[in-house]
Amino acid sequence: MPTTPVPYVNPTAVTFTLDGSLLTQSLGVFNPFPQDVLFKVDNAHPERYKVSLTQGVVCSRQKIYIEITCVSKNETSEDDIQVRFFRWSRPRQGQKPRAQQYIGYRAVKIRVFQSGFERERTPSISGSVSFSDMTEANPLSDYPHSGSIHTSYASSDTGHSSSSSRRRGKRRQVITNFALAVVLLVLGFVLNSLDEVWFSRNVIVGVKPQSLAIVCYTLSCVVTIKLLTFR
């Protein structure tokens, strides 16, 4: 069964300030893939954060929004929540729901500050770029509630680029192994055709070129077998 890609959650990091200026944030769950997906939000700290929706279904090429509210009053913290995803197929009438197949998860970093001033002074999770700059640079953060085809393209391009890189790497490995097998085979033919007496006197004393040719043939066979079994 082919692997179902993991949908996207944006932003991947949110901040709250306890002075009241920033107590609620929205997460966008975006599914650009053809398979409907069930999501579940794992909130390990319900005493600190309230989640508006803990479970739901994101249909193919759709998105939903989840609100996270900080209910902590006097404690700065840094936590994570996970959004887990499962394959979803709507059961037909009269049939029992199928077992849910786990796909993967997306983690969201949560940071709580005493004030907005402290939040601005603290380096972002990435180190040097502020959180506002991170969200502005992320194309998924700007898609509207009504839907945007550009967001789908941006999300799909990420998967396409990674798969293209893997294909290019495999192609280079195949070409390298093929060239190595040919070089070893040609070198074996050359060594096998050399005069044994001349080779022992002028190249390597006491070594027959035919012996080296056998070594080259063996290595060529090993590389060829590796090439044929490569996936």
Image: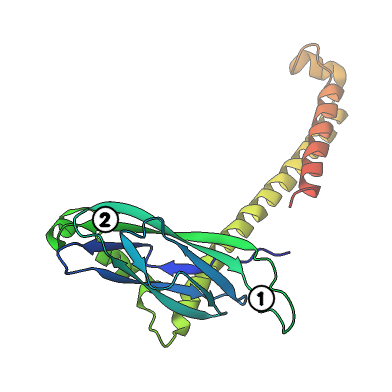
- Label 2 is placed on what type of residue? Ser
Badge 1: how crowded within 10 Å, few (<14), some, or many (20+)? Answer: some
Give the number of callouts.
2
| Residue ID at (61%, 53%) | 169
Answer whether residue 136 is visible to the viewer in this image.
Answer: no
Residue at the top extreme, as displayed: 206
Q: Find out whether the residues at labels 1 and 2 contact each other: C-beta distance under 8 Å.
A: no
Point 27% across, 71% down: residue? 24
Amino acid carrying mark 1 in the image: Ser
The picture places residue 45, in percent across and down from the top left corner, at 36, 56
Q: Is residue 119 left or right of residue 98?
A: left
- The residue at which mark 2 appears reads as 124
Left or right: 146 as drawn, with respect to 205: left
Occupied quadrant, residue 92: bottom right
> Which of 31/209 is in front?
31
Q: On screen, 31 above or below 101?
A: below
Tell me which corner region of the image, top left, top right, bottom left or bottom right, holds residue 194: top right
In x, y percent, where is residue 118?
A: 15, 56
- Tell me the SS state at disc 1: loop
At 83% from the left and 32% from the top, the residue drawn is 218
**Residue that carries the numbered disc 1 in the rendered image:** 89
Instruction: State the image coordinates of residue 39 (x, y, percent, origin top left).
Output: 52, 69
Res. 156 in view: yes
- Of 30 and 213, which appears nearest the observer? 30
In this picture, residue 119 sits left or right of residue 8: left
To which quarter of the image does residue 34 belong? bottom right
Distance from label 1 to label 2 (Cα)?
39 Å
Front-most of residues 93 and 21: 93
Frontmost residue, 8 versus 188: 8
State which tag comes first along the sequence, 1 or 2: 1
